[in-house]
Image: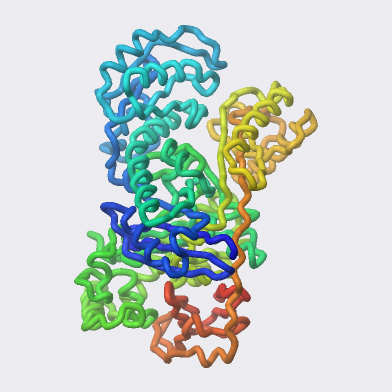
Amino acid sequence: MDEVRLGVDVGGTFTDLVVVSDGEAHVEKVASTPEAPERAVGAGVEAVGETAPPESIDFLGHGTTVATNAVLERDWAETALVTTAGFRDVLEIGRQDRPDIYDLHGSKPAPVVPRDRRYEVPGRLDERGEELEPVDREAVRAVADEIDADSVAVSLLFSFENADHERLVGDVLRESGVDSVSRSSALLPEIREYERTLATALNAALRPVVDDYLGRLDGDLSEVGVTASLRVMASNGGIVDARTARRRPVETLLSGPAAGVRGAAHVAGRLGREDVLTMDMGGTSCDVSLVEDGDPRVATDVTVGDYPVAVPMVDVHTVGSGGGSVAWLDDGGALRVGPRSAGADPGPICYGRGGSEPTITDAHCVLGRIDPGSFLGDVGGAIDETRAVFESLGEELGAGPREAARGVLEVADANMARALRVVSVERGYDPREFALVAFGGAGPLHAASVAADVGVPEVLVPRAAGVLSALGLLVSDLTYDRSTSRVRPWREVDPGELEETFGEFEADGAGRVPGGLPVEHERYVDLRYAGQSFDLRIPVPAELDAAELDAVAERFHERHEARYGHAAPGEPLELVTVRVRTRGVVDPPELDPPTVSGDPDDAIRETRTVGFDRDREAPVYAREALPTGAALDGPAVVEGSESTVVVRPDDALSVESDGTLRLEVGG
């Protein structure tokens, strides 16, 4: 029997599970329990028990929103900060960026650690890590005795060049009884005081929360008989062991979205598409990202809630357009959609659960694109209520109910198209050279129209579109990132010293990978023109000499031209940060392709009036009954157990060998 692999992704509404065993995938959804997410995980494990008895599970990957929710809701542990004398207010000062630079009354987000819990200690290093003033151990002990917090962050000046001072402070804090200590030199040893201190403070604030959750989850899994080690999806698109996630929870802030992007990259790669845009549209939001050469683009300037978090994360851009996003009119009478959502309770009106405000899902219902009764059962008079609400919305807009519904979808599509341009055009990529992978419960409903707006010629809708994040957990490598800032003129960089740093990081990463897995290393340097504030990440070959350093500089100029539209090859460069990514390469499970044959017409459930640019009669297909290799032209609707695909009049759809639906996007 092949290895049994289980992926569990906890979302706000549903907890998704995918079990892969003997070449077959089994999908299960259970209601999430936000007040105690581990309960839904346990219920899900029991629900898949017939397919995968707990004791038979060999691998368990987990995507979690616990850290994300804690940041969004500011529901974290009481945290203290210990920093260099004179730098107590780094968190408060932050950067000069403001959401609206012309707002004279604009305010910055509240600092993670309030001022009365921020402490200074004497001691100083210079910019190369040489000691100017030793740390006063007694002063640190006095600070430790004064601290009354659940967790402590330590961020000292220039600790990325020399960690000795931070180690001493950490040791004294632990000797004084502080159990949870996060050091910037261990977490994010990089330049930029605000970003480094913020990431360390967030890690400290989240550590008791995530540690407690994963501890409870591990206990619950053991009770139901799961013996496999728990592994957690990190924000960088790789899996880490639970111990690492508990110590470095800030690295799990985009756990769920990263798993979805990884799953999308896997599905597209099997079809020969290495460069794709991804679009994950759920009930409350839409996450978009970019995959290049089969790997999700990773950035260190992603904002989560109010905070720019500098740890490596899949470059996900989120907009408040989900199936439950509410349509409303602003003070000027303009139609807006989101970011407020009806959520799962009460949800869209057409679900018959007490919803009363028009949502994106309701607009699809009014236009005949979805039939809630097909996946919810009897919804009573909810559909009539939905039409009545859109009649009222249409009256306010001076239009009929169907025109109002079209307007809602057009506004939502525009929001998502804008997000896709942020991760593509604004990063120097041409969307016409990419395919779009659409997933989540609502993504395939909008994919073709959004792709047409952005200029993407092809859409892929995976067979497991509704649970792709859970599938992504099963195909992701174990991944560990190491970095350190070494700000030097590039011409002064010694290849031998750089090689030594790379070797140290690679040895550390290889030591974290369980035996039996192949190990791969990726080397990078962050470079910039001397005097610049922004840098670019450039890959570095395995063998280094002076000639290779020149080649790296050349690649920087090329990337700068692509990213910003100009380059200055004659200008001196500066090394900023050295990075290594270590992968424990996982062999993805092989899934047997579906064996559906027959005539596509046999898959037609009904013919329905569906609203596109105008109302048209369109066949409604059962996705599971569409034969492999089938091809059909729009207009059409393809209903699946997890999502619905809308095929516009000028689009063409085909069924790939693995069950993925491929849409050729028309005008």
Quarter residue 549 falls in: top right
The residue lying at 64 percent from left, 34 percent from top is: 506
The residue lying at 53 percent from left, 18 percent from top is: 162
How far across and down, in percent of the image, does residue 594 sit? 58, 77
In this view, 83 is above or below 413 = above
How far across and down, in percent of the image, does residue 419 sit? 46, 56
- Looking at the picture, tell me which residue is in the foreground, 545 or 328: 545
In this view, 151 is above or below 392 = above
Q: Is residue 546 left or right of residue 566?
A: right
How far across and down, in percent of the image, does residue 196 sit? 45, 30
> Which quadrant does the N terminus fall into?
bottom right
Quarter residue 587 falls in: bottom right
Q: Is residue 652 visible?
A: yes
- Looking at the picture, tell me which residue is in the foreground, 339 or 183: 183
- Looking at the picture, tell me which residue is in the foreground, 319 or 595: 595
Q: Is residue 451 left or right of residue 402?
A: right
How far across and down, in percent of the image, does residue 304 sit? 39, 45
